Image (spheres, helix red, strand yellow):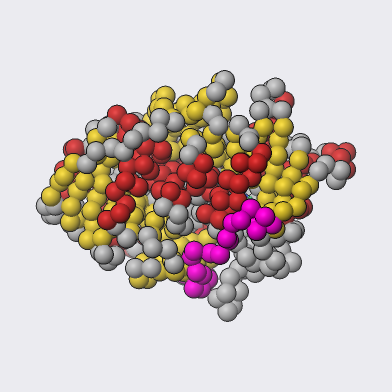
């Protein structure tokens, strides 16, 4: 079985995000970028499936600017076999919407015929939580979202999902789209020899136009602003003082 | 214009708070029709009919709609979509599973986790873990939206909408439900509680999380946790507050042994009053706290629990 893993290049989760003063967006020039943390988990899961003999090839794909090559190389260094970069924007500030990403991924799926797509549950930049579900809809495939456990049993996947009430387990028909949550696994680091090897692994370059997909956004960004700031608080000296302050504020 | 609102239904019961909050968000967009779907959903439909501002309720009952499997629920919504310009839901995990699927089937973008309504086409939503707020204007013919419940007040009761039944769409039969592991609790529900007490890695063990629970019980509060506390097995996953867990905005949020990573702040920084108890005076949680106490939680929390008696 072939596993396809879409990986997104996003601002590193440790970086303090700065909103541009003119309200045009978030400043991404000269900022550390990394693979979306959820996608690292998806890559790791694919590698574990391969190690367990349940997958034989892992193809990673990223859609965006040419710099996403680095993200793909990271995935190759972790253990993916092959990469596809779909150039869809020139400016690092352009975010391709989940609907367009899903449309491109649907074409990649048609070409590659994977048995499983493992995506992240959410990109930590746009926080959309949509691409996997959209891809699944476009392909008419089953979906198992927010997975914290995944078992492949023949032509079914058993997915344990993190939901508001706790955990839900479902069984989905393959081929399927599974989106991964944080507790599915702990991704490995790429070793130095593997980073070197990854440089020689195949990386195909395509464009959105090659797939005939229009990436014009459906949502026009009117403005991007800082969230409302909180008023400065105080440090209290003791539990007694805390109780007193809470009573004064009517909080208890 | 008309709005179709997917009610949150769990095992045949309406999740009133989440649904009523989405009704508030949706009201300004047009007449609200609530869809209650499930294996059983009639009682949920009756309950939804009483929410103030609901014009009509549709009840869809079918085994294929039980357990809110995405494929069958999305197919049902799409079969009804023709009549509505907005298709909305509270931003629960169920809706986040279903609504993007609905949007893609309709060839429109989804607007996830909207925190504000500017006009019928324009919405605000937090991005980058709440470090920025984006205003987006939709150019799609239909708008598919999930509303972040923590920023809308629940609509009241007193409505008396008419209730109709509708049939399920063809079940694509792609998924089957196996089991739910739901912890029963007498405590208030995390996303609707007036007070939340959360523990982090600093609490140190599942055993010591009892300290957090005792304080919560004293305040009739819900219990929350940081991701680190959940990952370490001190607390169950459905207690996680943050960018990738639940978003809460109670009257009072008490963070104990939590450092205050942006991913955690994303889920609680709109709380009215924030209290932080942490032994490290440099912990970033103090930057959002109204009242900070630099102390060892193992002394401070039992003392606080006692003094609030
Ligand atoms: C993609 C992604 C998504 C994430 N989503 C979330 C999310 O939704 N929610 C979330 O919470 N995190 C999330 N995280 C994790 C987040 O980055 C932090 O790692 C996490 O919030 C840290 O949890 P913590 O504050 O409990 O632990 P730590 O950062 O380890 O902090 C523990 C704190 O306890 C204090 N402490 C220790 N002992 C005591 C004591 N005896 N008395 C008092 N204080 C004490 C310490 O001073 C310290 O400040 C996410 C991370 C990523 C990468
Ligand atoms: N531009 C992209 N390139 C590759 N994968 C993507 C891209 N955007 C989203 N994805 C995948 O879809 C998941 C969810 O993203 P989102 O729906 O944007 O929150 C991510 O974790 C990735 O696996």
> At 51% across and 41% down in the image, what residue appears?
A139
- Residue B185 is situated, as x and y percent measured from the top left of the image, at 33, 33
* Most foreground residue, B308 or B148: B148
- Residue A37 is situated, as x and y percent measured from the top left of the image, at 64, 47
The residue at the far top in this view is A154
Q: Is residue B273 left or right of residue A157?
A: left
Q: Is residue B295 in the magenta section?
A: no
> At 42% across and 24% down in the image, what residue appears?
B178
Which range of residues does the magenta coloring cover? Answer: A207-230
Q: Is residue A15 left or right of residue B185?
A: right
Q: Is residue B47 left or right of residue A226?
A: left
> At 69% across and 57% down in the image, what residue appears?
A207
* Most foreground residue, B235 or B105: B105
Q: Is residue A220 in the magenta section?
A: yes
Residue B234, above or below B2: above
- Residue B115 is situated, as x and y percent measured from the top left of the image, at 40, 61
Q: Using the rendered image of the protein, determine whether residue A96 is visible from the camera's viewpoint.
A: yes
């Amino acid at each position: 079985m072939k596993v396809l893993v879409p990986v997104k290049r996003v601002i590193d989760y440790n970086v303090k995000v700065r909103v541009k003063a003119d309200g045009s967006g978030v400043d991404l020039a000269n900022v550390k970028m990394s693979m979306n943390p959820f996608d690292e988990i998806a890559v790791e899961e694919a590698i574990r499936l391969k190690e367990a003999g349940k997958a034989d090839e892992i193809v990673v794909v990223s859609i965006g600017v040419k710099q996403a090559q680095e993200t793909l190389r990271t995935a190759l260094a972790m253990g993916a076999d092959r990469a596809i970069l779909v150039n869809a924007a020139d400016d690092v500030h352009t975010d391709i919407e989940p609907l367009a990403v899903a449309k491109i991924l649907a074409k990649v799926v048609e070409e590659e015929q994977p048995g499983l797509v493992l995506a992240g549950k959410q990109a930590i930049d746009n926080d959309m939580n949509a691409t996997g579900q959209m891809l699944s809809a476009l392909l008419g495939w089953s979906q198992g979202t927010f997975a914290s456990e995944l078992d492949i049993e023949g032509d079914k996947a058993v997915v344990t999902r993190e939901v508001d009430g706790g955990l839900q387990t479902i069984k989905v028909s393959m081929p399927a789209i599974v989106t991964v949550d944080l507790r599915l696994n702990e991704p490995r680091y790429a070793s130095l020899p593997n980073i070197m090897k990854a440089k020689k692994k195949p990386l195909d370059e395509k464009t959105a136009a090659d797939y005939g997909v229009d990436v014009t956004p459906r949502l026009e960004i009117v403005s991007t602003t800082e969230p409302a700031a909180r008023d400065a608080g105080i440090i209290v000296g003791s539990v007694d003082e805390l109780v007193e302050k809470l009573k004064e504020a009517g909080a208890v | 214009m008309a709005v179709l609102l997917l009610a949150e239904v769990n095992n045949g019961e309406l999740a009133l708070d989440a649904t009523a909050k989405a009704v508030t968000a949706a009201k300004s967009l047009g007449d609200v029709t609530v869809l209650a779907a499930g294996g059983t959903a009639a009682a949920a439909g009756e309950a939804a009919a009483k929410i103030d501002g609901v014009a009509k309720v549709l009840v869809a009952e079918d085994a294929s709609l039980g357990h809110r499997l995405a494929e069958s629920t999305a197919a049902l919504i799409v079969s009804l979509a023709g009549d509505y310009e907005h298709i909305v839901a509270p931003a629960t995990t169920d809706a986040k599973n279903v609504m993007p699927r609905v949007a893609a089937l309709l060839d429109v973008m989804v607007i996830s986790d909207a925190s504000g309504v500017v006009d019928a086409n324009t919405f605000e939503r937090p991005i980058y873990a709440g470090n920025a707020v984006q205003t987006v204007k939709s150019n799609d013919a239909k708008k598919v939206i999930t509303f972040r419940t923590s920023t809308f007040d629940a609509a009241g009761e007193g409505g008396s909408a008419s209730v109709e039944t509708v049939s399920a769409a063809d079940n694509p039969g792609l998924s089957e439900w196996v089991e739910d592991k739901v912890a029963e609790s007498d405590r208030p529900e995390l996303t609707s509680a007036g007070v939340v007490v959360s523990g982090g890695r600093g609490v140190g063990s599942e055993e010591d999380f009892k300290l957090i629970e005792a304080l919560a019980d004293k305040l009739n509060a819900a219990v929350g946790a940081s991701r680190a506390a959940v990952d370490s097995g001190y607390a169950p996953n459905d207690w996680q507050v943050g960018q990738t867990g639940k978003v809460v905005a109670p009257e009072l949020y008490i963070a104990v042994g939590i450092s205050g990573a942006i991913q955690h702040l994303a889920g609680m920084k709109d709380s009215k009053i924030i209290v932080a108890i942490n032994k490290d005076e440099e912990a970033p949680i103090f930057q959002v706290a109204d009242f900070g106490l630099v102390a060892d939680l193992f002394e401070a929390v039992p003392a606080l629990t006692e003094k609030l008696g």
